[in-house]
Image (tube, rainbow, N blue to C red):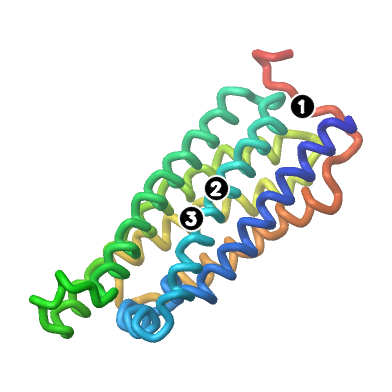
Amino acid sequence: MNSIKKTARIAGLLYFIYIIASIIADLFGHFVFADASATVSHIMAHESLFRIGVVISLFSYVFFLLAAWYLYVLLKAVNKTIALLFLLLNLGGFVILVYSHLNLFSSLTLLSGADYLKVFQPDQLQAQATLFINLYKTGSTIAQIPFGVWLLPLGYLVFKSGFLPKILGILLIVDCFGLLIYVCQRFLLPGYAVIAYPCWAMGFIAEVSLTLWLLINGVKNQKPTLSDGQQ
């Protein structure tokens, strides 16, 4: 039981670091909750801060992947196959997001003032940089598909575990559908961002609740409920 509690707290700590690092990354870089034109202006005015933000963002997703691994270690006793599924889904989202960060570095290069770029007019470079930032945002939205779906098996295993509160599992499952609704809104109804607001609120509640529970409480003093094939 002590080993399970330690694993739970490590997962919670890594998840917490990911959340905090993500917030700090956007405070420095202004590329998540700002529109593309605002990000371009920020790069031109504060290039060093933007660079720091992008690097922090990249490492934040490393912590997210590590948190998923420790959740896999924690929950594989419930059902190893389903635990492996949510780990692979998280890995898929990680790959998409890391690759999408290339667009941020591309926009940074376009606005760097390098000599070989002087053949372009400043407004042309800014337009291209805006394009790359929008491509990053598109890739980030696509990554929410595996990042959303991973919450379904994760929530199911949390619900069935017996050593984590069932309400956390329910919140994670609801968060799964909320993220998928957000993706559909971004691509099908881009002018109706208000649709996604409740989804983001639910996601914040679900994932922060899981993080704080793991970090502070660990797990209950109860054996996990094993799947039929593992009993």
Give the labeled residue for mark 2: 62
* 106 w.r.t. 6: above or below: below
Query: Which amino acid type is shown beneath numbered disc 2?
Result: Val
Q: Mark 3: few, some, or many residues within 10 Å (few <14, many ≥20)?
A: some
Query: Which amino acid type is shown beneath numbered disc 1?
Result: Thr
**Marks 1/2: CA–CA distance:** 30 Å
The secondary element bearing badge 2 is classed as helix
The secondary element bearing badge 1 is classed as loop
Residue 195 shows in this picture = no
Between circles 1 and 2, the one closer to the viewer is 2
Q: Earlier in the sequence, mark 1 or mark 2?
A: 2
**Measuring 54% from the left and 53% from the top, which residue is drawn there?**
59
Q: Mark 2: few, some, or many residues within 10 Å (few <14, many ≥20)?
A: some
**Where residue 106 is drawn, which disc sits there?**
none
Q: Is residue 109 left or right of residue 13?
A: left
* 12 w.r.t. 83: above or below: below
Q: Is residue 223 left or right of residue 30?
A: right
Q: Is residue 171 left or right of residue 199?
A: right
Query: Which amino acid type is shown beneath numbered disc 3?
Result: Leu
Q: Mark 1: few, some, or many residues within 10 Å (few <14, many ≥20)?
A: some
**Measuring 84% from the left and 31% from the top, which residue is drawn there?**
3
Q: Are marks 2 and 3 in contact (CB under 8 Å)?
A: yes
Give the labeled residue for mark 3: 58
**Where residue 225 is drawn, which disc sits there?**
1
Residue 81 horizontal/vertical position (percent): 56, 23
Residue 216 horizontal/vertical position (percent): 84, 53
The secondary element bearing badge 3 is classed as helix
